[in-house]
Image (tube, rainbow, N blue to C red):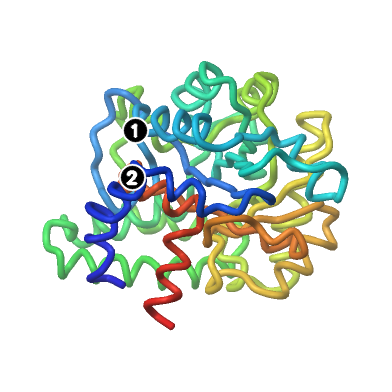
Amino acid sequence: MRFVSPLLKHVVYPTIGRTGWIQRSLPASGCAVVNYHGVLPDGYSTCDAFLDGNLVSRETLRRQIRLLKNRYNVVSPDEFHNWIAGHGELPTRAVLITCDDGLLNTLTDMLPILASEDVRCIFFVLGLSCRPENASLWYEDLYFCLANERNGIGDSKRVSTDLRARWWQAVQEMSGLDFAEREDRIRKFGTRREQNENCASVRRWSLLNADQLKLLHSSGMEIGSHTLSHPVLSACSEDLARREIEESKPDLENLLNKPVWAFAYPFGNPGTMGDREVRLAREAGFACAFVNTGGGNVDRSQPFRLSRTHVTADMNLAEFEAHVSGLHNRLQRAVLG
C-alpha cells in the first residue's frame, strides 16, 4: 500500500472524485466522523513537520468543511448523541466533526471558521484545561527536550527516525507515571522550546485554560473528555488509567456546568488502548468513545470504539474525501488482504 498510495492520492482519487463516485461510496445510512487536532495559526512557522503534521492550515480546513457541506450532511453533536443512543435517525450520508487535544488555536483560529460555516464540533479536551493557566502537551515538550539534547537531530532523515523511536519509547515509559511526576522528569531534561515565543507560537503549543475553554463552549461547541493529561492509557496501571478517564469527566462538568457525554482515547490506535480502556470509559459514565483510526461510517453497535478519519496536513481534498467515505480503508484491506 505504501507504493500504491501516491498513485491513489494524486491520480485515482482526484479523477473519481470529480465524478461524484467517492461521495456515493459512503452508505446513505449511518454516520462518518472526521477528526482534527487543530489549525496552524497565521504567522506560525513550522519548526518540526513531525509534530505539526496533525494540524491543517486555515484554508485547508475551510475547503474540507465546504466539501462536507456540499456533498454530505454535517450533523451537530446533539443529533449524533441522540442517534448513538438509539433515538431518531440522521440524514443520509451524515458526517460529524470532532477535534482532539484542545490547543489554544482551536479557539483563536479554528472556531472563527466553524462559526462562519455554521457547523458545530465536539472538542475533546484535557482536564488540564480546567486550570487557570495555560498548560502544554507533555509529550510534545518531551520531544523538544530530546531533540535539543541531540543537537539538531532532525536535520538528518536517519537520525530523525532515531529520535522519533526514542521519543515514542519514552512516551510509553513515562505514561506509567502520574502527571506531576511526568512533568518533574521532563523538567530535569532541561531545555524545552524557546521561551520568547511570538503570539502565533503560543497559539500553536498552548492548551486552552479554564476561561478560554468556557468561551469555546459558550460559542455553541460541544466539549468532550480526552483524559486528564493525555497518557498512553495501555501503558498505565489500571488505577492510573481509571483516574485519567474518570476524573476528567467531573472536572469538565463542574467547570462548564453541563454533562460531558463523549470521550476520545488519547492517541486512539490499537497499540495505545484496548478492551480495558473500553471498559473503563463505559464505567466512567460516558455515552460513547472514539478511536482515531478508520474511516467511513461508525459501527453504532460498538459505541465505545467509534472510528474516525484522522485528518493530516498532507491530505489533498480528494484523498480527504476518500478517507471520510471509507473508500481508502476498503482499498487498503483489499490490497493487504
Where does residue 65 sit, x and y in percent of width and height? 47, 32
Q: Is residue 164 left or right of residue 188?
A: left
The 10 Å Cα crowd at callout 1, few under 14, some 14 to 19, many 20 or more, is: some
Q: Are marks 2 and 1 in contact (CB under 8 Å)?
A: yes
- Report the residue at 66% width, 50% height from top: 228
* Callout 2 secondary element: loop
- Report the residue at 60% width, 42% height from top: 95
Q: How many marks?
A: 2
Where does residue 185 sit, x and y in percent of width and height? 47, 60
Q: Is residue 231 left or right of residue 16?
A: right
The 10 Å Cα crowd at callout 2, few under 14, some 14 to 19, many 20 or more, is: some
Residue wearing tag 1 = 57
Tell me the tag on residue 313: 2
Q: Quadrant of residue 259?
A: top right
Where does residue 176 sit, x and y in percent of width and height? 58, 70
Residue that protrudes farthest toward the bottom in the picture = 337
Looking at the picture, does residue 246 appear above or below residue 249? below
- What is the CA distance from the residue labelled 2 to the residue labelled 1? 7 Å
Q: Quadrant of residue 83?
A: top right
